Image (cartoon, rainbow, N blue to C red):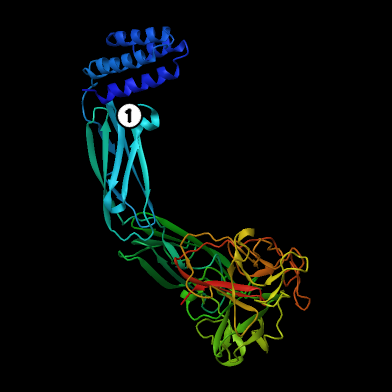
Amino acid sequence: MCTNRALTDLYAFSARFIQLLNRKLAYVCIADYYKSEQNVLFCLTLIIIFMKKHFFNATFWALLSLALWTTGCSDDDGYSDVDGQIPTMTLVTDHIESGAGHRFTIEGSLADQDGIVSVNLQCADLYLNKTIDLVEIYGAPQTEYELSYSYDLKRDEIGERFTVKVTVTDAGGREVSQDVLITMDGDFENPTFTIAPGKEVTVLIKDETKFNLNFTVKDDRILDYVLIEIPGVEGFESRRIEAGGQSTLSFTEKIILPNEVKSYDVTLTAVDARGNQTVTNSTISVSEMPDFPKMYLADVATVEELNSDIFGVPMVINHTGEYQYRARYYNKAAGTEIFFLPQKTDFTPICFGLDPEDNTKLTDDPETAKPIVLDEAGVYYEIDINVKESTYSMRTYSVTEATNPMKYEYGKPCFDRWENGESFIDFYIGWGGSPQDAGNQLFAQDKNNPHLFYYPENGTWTLEAGEEMNFIISNYHPDGWWDHVEWRCDDSQNVEKFGYFSKKGDVNPDWEGTNQRWEDGSMVGDNWMKPTVTVTGNYRFEFDAHLGRGKIVPAN
């Protein structure tokens, strides 16, 4: 019988010989492919045919067929197995931990002296049946091969374990197989601090100067521990908080600090059961009341809500003077409760609210402060506060009095498509990531406030943890002309406010603001919005064109 090795050699030679038949290189071809004595007759026959310049084609094919039969198929002499052994397969592992939406890779070293012709990977439950044909890839069997095959599991895969059979076949038809177990318990994510101190936190000097350390950390599998380090604080030793096999760990502790102006570094290190870790750092500054560079309005009730947004909560307000700040806020419903915070992630250590002993004054004590209640619905509030004097004042104005940069009526055919005064399309705004995508994710306009917009209007908008967004807000245009009505932001990765950025100078003349300028007169940079999603879930985008503020928050 013909061996696979013999046929491979003969087929390769025949193809090469025919290719070179009209060249003198046929001699080289013959010498190169058949050096054994057993093939002399076959080689001489082909040489004679070549010297006859293949005038007798019928004779050539007859002799070639005979030669193939007698030299390649009469027996295995000249093409006998080198060792006749089954292939060897050494896989890196026979158990891979993976997960839905993730990729697993099967790797290993394969060897066979007779030459490996193929590798097959099969798993019916995954609809996997892949054959790696080494002869097709390399032109000949391989005595050694480094296997590395990757497979992407579907995001909606619900199976818990799968077996992939790996089969290696050599030139003699001998096979060896090995099973690889794929389980869906892989740990790919680092722990995430859903609540943690901000990068800069101020603690005011009081009779008892204290810092409430508050954090929550989560892991998609199992947490191991959190390490707390605050060097320089007398009486506070670094400590390790065990998670006890849980996926979530919350911690709160009051730390007494010396009554002196000083800064302390806080380092929190969360480690999961697989050794994946996340580190967050904060600087705690002890001082008298400072002129905070930023102040925020919080209209939520819990620390969890302060930290569940992608951006926009709490809402940054304007710093109008030394110790002075102004907030503008659209109140959707009567009874909204608000506080003012100099830190973004917690209501401590400083929270400005009503003094319970004199509600015409503010207090900074988070344990006693009462919320400022907004009783009138459907209006804008303007609130001025002075944190040094502990004073505040506020007024309301209607949505009709409010202005925004757009001079177009939303949803009406008033936008000049070609800038020629002849072709008008309906005007919309939305978010998009390229000119071709200009405003395609359309905002829905609020029924009660023409300056307020939402996305999506209906359905759900799902974002994945780790996803890096990249977009601007602009006018919709089917041909990508987005430079009429558009907004940029203050900080791409840490979005807090939006600035109007019309490169066409397309501005509502009644708007109180200035194109490409912030309220303080500084320039609006060409900063795209590029926040990173930290928690997978359904979200809602809210944008106020009058305020230049927006937020992406979990949808109900």
Q: Residue 167's image quarter?
A: top left
Assign a secondary structure to mark 1.
strand
Residue denoted by label 1:
144
Callout 1 amino acid: Glu
Depth order, front residue of 492/409: 409
Q: On screen, 44 above or below 184?
A: above
Depth order, front residue of 215/389: 215
Q: Is residue 456 left or right of residue 84?
A: right
Q: Residue at x 46, y 77 (%)?
A: 556
Q: On screen, 360 above or below 541?
A: below
> How many other residues sit within 10 Å of disc 1, few (<14), some (14-19) or many (≥20)?
some
Q: Position of residue 243 (x, y in %)?
A: 34, 65
Q: Position of residue 242 (x, y in %)?
A: 34, 64
Depth order, front residue of 38/270: 38
Q: Residue at x 53, y 59 (%)?
A: 468
Quarter occupied by the N terminus: top left
Q: On screen, 165 above or below 42?
A: below
Q: Residue 204's image quarter?
A: bottom right
